[in-house]
Image: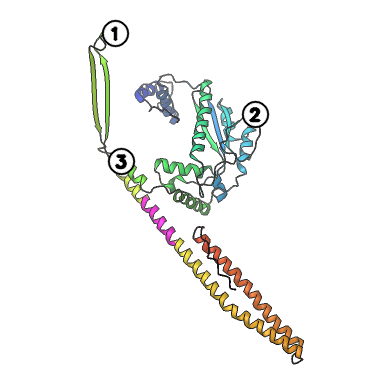
Amino acid sequence: MMHFSIPPVDFSLAQALQEKIDNKTKPVGSLGRLEEIAVRIGCIQHTLSPQLRDPHMLIFAGDHGAAHAGISAYPQDVSWQMLENYLKGGAAANVFSRLNGMTMLAIDAGVAHDFGPREGLIDAKIDPAGTRNYLEEPAMTRAQCLAAIAKGAEIARAVADRGCNIMGVGEKGIGNTGSASLITHLLTGASLDDCVGRGTGLDDTALAHKKALMKQAIQRAGLPADADVTVARAAMLPTVRLTASYGVGSDRVRDVLDNPIYNLAAGLVAPIFNNGRLAAGRDLSLARREELLADYRASIISSLGDVENALNALQGSAKQQEAHQEVLVHGREAVRLAESRYRSGSDTMQALLDTQRTLFQAQDLAVQLRLENLLATIDLYKALGGGWRPKRMASSK
């Protein structure tokens, strides 16, 4: 099991860092966001003189199975072509890295293409075909997910061990914004509509289709609609903190156990005023749950309607076939009588041919009715979600 320790940023030096920046030969605040970033880097490194050593840019490329469902304006083959452009140094990330003295690494995390051994490319494939289509099945197994995280951590640690203390990370692959939207929505609780964007330049119609597919993926996974509500409500409750410490009142080793000092403290932290933010978050989660439930009910009603329509079509087709059997019986009898009259010389060849043509037309119609019955059976099978088998008709002897 992997464990990552990411301590919160200590902002105790923030004021001193800002004062140091303000005392530079420049108007106060003239560097805008760069000053905020500089203060944060200083707090992260916990020093008034932060340094950026051997900066790296890590680009992870991979393919997403959901690209086949039309969530992007471009086909999946574009993924490996884009990675080729990175390897040739022609992408925007290459230019940015060169201008800022950064080392850029391209990582194949699962592109559906065989690059072979390539200079400048790190092979970190988990699955040679990329992820699977999350609209139909889990994109990855739990083992694959953990392996991917471990591989990314291994690459990052190797870069850090070489002296790098700052790195930028990015990802590339057709369908990437769909996966990112779903992860952001589920981890942060943000509205799915706010998370889903146009990606590679989708128009309004394609964007609406993409959002519908994202909602479909969440429903397929069977994610609990009450999860967000539970988290939002929990944020409104107080939290308990318990701390303990142990010390000694002597500077001699032999007296360590003779003069112990214990300190045990408990604290209760409760939100008092947050301008309604927590309550609004709870209400938003409740509304999102109701939306998911409404979509679920609508899906059930739609599915029942599809089944009813398919059953009606199948029943109507069966009745037509049954009625047409009588037409075939009468047609065969008419041909038999026409042949008898022709052999006896009481009827002409033309009359016999007309009777046979009528029978052939009836047989052709019987084949068409049989086809309609099979198509109706398939529609019912699809409406039921598969797994349905019609009963075998008892053969007449």
Say whether residue 351 is magenta: no
* Front one among 397 and 285: 397
Q: CA distance from mark 2 to mark 3?
A: 51 Å
Q: In front: mark 1 or mark 2?
A: 1
Nearer-N-terminus badge (3/1): 3
Quadrant in the picture for residue 319:
bottom right
Residue 278 screen position, x and y as percent: 31, 42
Residue 46 in view here: yes
Q: Residue furthest front?
A: 397
Which residue position holds label 2? 119
Residue 330 screen position, x and y as percent: 63, 83
Which residue position holds label 1? 253
Q: Secondary structure at mark 1?
A: helix
Dot 3 amino acid type: Ala
Q: Secondary structure at mark 2?
A: loop
Q: Residue furthest bottom?
A: 346
Quadrant in the picture for residue 131:
top right
Dot 2 amino acid type: Glu
Which residue position holds label 3? 234
Q: CA distance from mark 1 to mark 2?
A: 59 Å
Q: Are marks 2 and 3 in contact (CB under 8 Å)?
A: no
Nearer-N-terminus badge (1/2): 2
Say whether residue 293 is magenta: yes
* Crowding near the residue tagged with mark 2, few <14, some 14–19, many ≥20 C-alpha atoms within 10 Å: few
Q: Are marks 3 and 1 in contact (CB under 8 Å)?
A: no
Q: Which residues are magenta?
A: 289-301
Nearer-N-terminus badge (2/3): 2
Q: Is residue 141 left or right of residue 87?
A: left
Q: Are marks 1 and 2 in contact (CB under 8 Å)?
A: no
* Crowding near the residue tagged with mark 1, few <14, some 14–19, many ≥20 C-alpha atoms within 10 Å: few
Residue 328 screen position, x and y as percent: 63, 79
Dot 1 amino acid type: Val
